[in-house]
Structures are given as C-alpha cells and as structure tokens.
Image: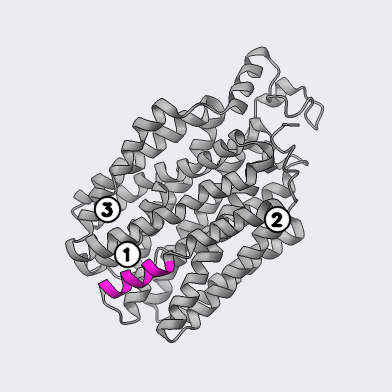
Amino acid sequence: MVDAFDVGLFSFVLALLAADWGLGPAERGLLGSANSLGMAVGAFLAGLIADRWGRRLVFMGTLLFFSLGTMLSALALGFGMMLAFRFFIGLGLGGELPIAATYVSETAPPRERARAVVMAESFWAIGWFLAALLAHFIMARHGWRAGLLLGGLPALLILYARRNLPESKAFLRLKTDRRKGRGDGGDRDRAADGRTAADAGAVSAGQLFDPEHRRGTVTLWTLWWAINFAYYGMFLWLPSLMMARGFDVVQSFEYVLWMTVAQLPGYLSAAWLIERLGRRPVLAFYLLGTAVAAYGFGQASSIAALLGFGAALNFFNLGAWGALYAYTPELYPTALRARGAGTAAAIGRLGAIVAPYAVGWLLGRGFTQAGVFWLFVTVLLLAVATLLLLGPETKSRAALGEA
C-alpha cells in the first residue's frame, strides 16, 4: 500500500511540477527515470542482503528509507535536488517490493501461497487510490509540497513491524542449515552439477543461469522489463496526459481517481483465478488485456472512452502485476529466491528507467498519445509471447521446498 502511495503520489507531483517549475516533457521523464534507476539498484542490493541477513531487516529498512525520503523531497528547491531525492527514494522503494513478495511466499501455506501474494499485492490498489484522493483534495488546492510531506507518514509502520513481524521460517531454516554446513535449506540434496548442497549454499547470481533455472530466468527478466516499461511509461504520465488532453488539474486528478478504482477488482480477480487456472495462463491473460486496454486508451476520443479504457488499463495491468509477483519466487529454491526475485526486479527497473524518459522524448518531438501507446502494446505482446513459448509453469505446492 505504501509503495503504491509513493509511486502514485509522484505521478501527480510530476503534473504539478511542470507548471510550478516550467518543466518540459523530457525533464519530467528524466525525474521518473531517476526514480527507476534507484529502484533498479535497490532491488539488486536488497536481494543480496536479504538472502544473507534476512527478509525482515531489509523489509523494515527499505520502508523507512523511502518514506522519510518522500517527506524530505518536499524541501527540494529545484530540478537537480528533486532528481537526487527521487534516486534515493527509488533505492528504498525498489528494494522493498521484491523482498515483500518473497516474504509472503515463504510464510503463506503452500495451498494458498499464490493467492496470498496476489492479495498482499492488491493493497497496491489501495495505495494508489489514497494517493489519488490526496492529490484531488489536497495537492490540487495546496500544491505538491503538501502531498510529499504527508507521503512520509508510512514510516510510522516501522513501529508496528518491529514488534509484530517475525522472520521468515524458510530463511531461518536456511540460516540454520548454513551454520551446520548443509547449504540451501533442504530445497535440493545435491546441486545439478554434482556439488554438495553445502557448496550450493554459497549462491551467486551466475546460478540463475544454471540449466535448471535458465528458462525461468530469461522469462522473468523479459516479463519484468516489459511490465515495468508499460506501467511506469503509462501510469507515471497518466495525470499529465489527461491535462495534455485539455482537462484542468482538478478534472484530470478526478478522472484518474475514478480509473484507479478498477485496480482492486483487477487484483482480486487475479487472486481468485490464479489457484484455479495456474500462474502462467492467468499472467498471460492479464498482460494481453493490458495490451488491448492500452490500444483503446491511446485511440480514445471521448471522456467515456477515456474513462472506460483507463479503468480497463488499471484492472488488467494491476492484475498482471499480482500474478507476476506470485509467479516469480516459485521458480527458485530458498537459497536463491530473494536474489532471483531481486535481480528480476532490478532488470525490470531498467524498463522503468527507459520508459518515462522515452515518453517525454516522443511527446516532445510531436508524437501523438496514440503513437506512444502503440509502443506499449508492442512491448506487452512481446512479453505474452515470451511467457507462452518459453515460460515454465511452477509446481506451486512443492516450489518452496515444502511437501
């Protein structure tokens, strides 16, 4: 919820900064890219740290980092200072997202694991909705600094998490087995290349491309890059795109608020379907739905069409995110799980780095919104093809080393 609150809040901040500081499309895109660059670095580092020192510590540290960073960014005096703040906020935000999904995967019962991950991810919709409410009722009237100051409030959740959030039992087993010299927490008795499990416990990023993980890694990296490119290219720009269509600040924020309502049903429907149909087909369906909605939004010429396709975009894209978070950790054993998820998320952030700047660059050179959204459609269809042709289906009940 607080992750989405920060990302959603900044999408509205971008629209207001354009007027306040006279920023062009390329500069606004660069701010979004700086945030995503920080997220890429944060996701990679958090995966390394969490596989070594635990999920709980990284979860709390990253949450505190980006919440306080959001509050401090309200003091930014110019473009360069805001650019630096967005990078450091991204470090915390990017690190927290994959670790949270890994934690939920390791603590939920096997029969309910995918549903639990998607339900946890569904709170992203609530965070976006809260950001849209804050933007509509506070920021549209009192400016972006007021919104960013309030964006630091989630740091208070650390007080609850510190007292009530236990470490993942799967990680504790892994930690115990490492001390005893058994290696990877019982996920495998022997590595594929003949090494003992104790040797396999000293994992490296290179193991993501061992024969048993290669297809999954390539699929995940493609999916994470594509969904990040589409999401951060479309959603960070959404308020600005609405204003570019001739709506004032209050109208634009209100329309985006109504579109955001569709995010929660998208998550909940994905959570219901994912245990019945499997991770891979549900993920493919929601990615394809996102592509269709993106095409419709780019072509829309009436308010009704904008709201309808905008709601569909929120519904399918956020459902796809939930399915992807459920799919990702189940492709790796415990000793490699946080690193595998964190690295995939880091690769995804490369798409998130490119997308906001690419949109600004294209708009600044006279491309229409319809032309820009064709780019998103192409990327999403590539992701669907990769998933269906290459992606493995997970063995969900045994995937995390449980009977």
Q: Which mark is residue 113?
A: none
Disc 3 to disc 1, how far (Cα)?
11 Å
Compared with residue 225, is residue 193 higher up or lower down, i.e. above or below? above
Q: Which residue is mark 2?
A: 280
Q: Which residue is mark 3?
A: 82
The residue lying toward the viewer, choosing from 276 and 47, is 276
- Give the residue displayed 42% in from the left and 86% down from the top: 302
Disc 3 to disc 2, how far (Cα)?
39 Å
Q: Position of residue 337 (x, y in %)?
A: 62, 36
- Give the residue displayed 74% in from the left and 23% down from the top: 197
- Quadrant position of residue 135: bottom left
Q: Which residue is mark 1?
A: 27
- Give the residue displayed 40% in from the left and 25% down from the top: 163
Disc 2 to disc 1, how far (Cα)?
37 Å
> Magenta span has 68?
no
> Magenta span has 253?
yes
SS for callout 2? helix
Bounds of the magenta span?
250-259
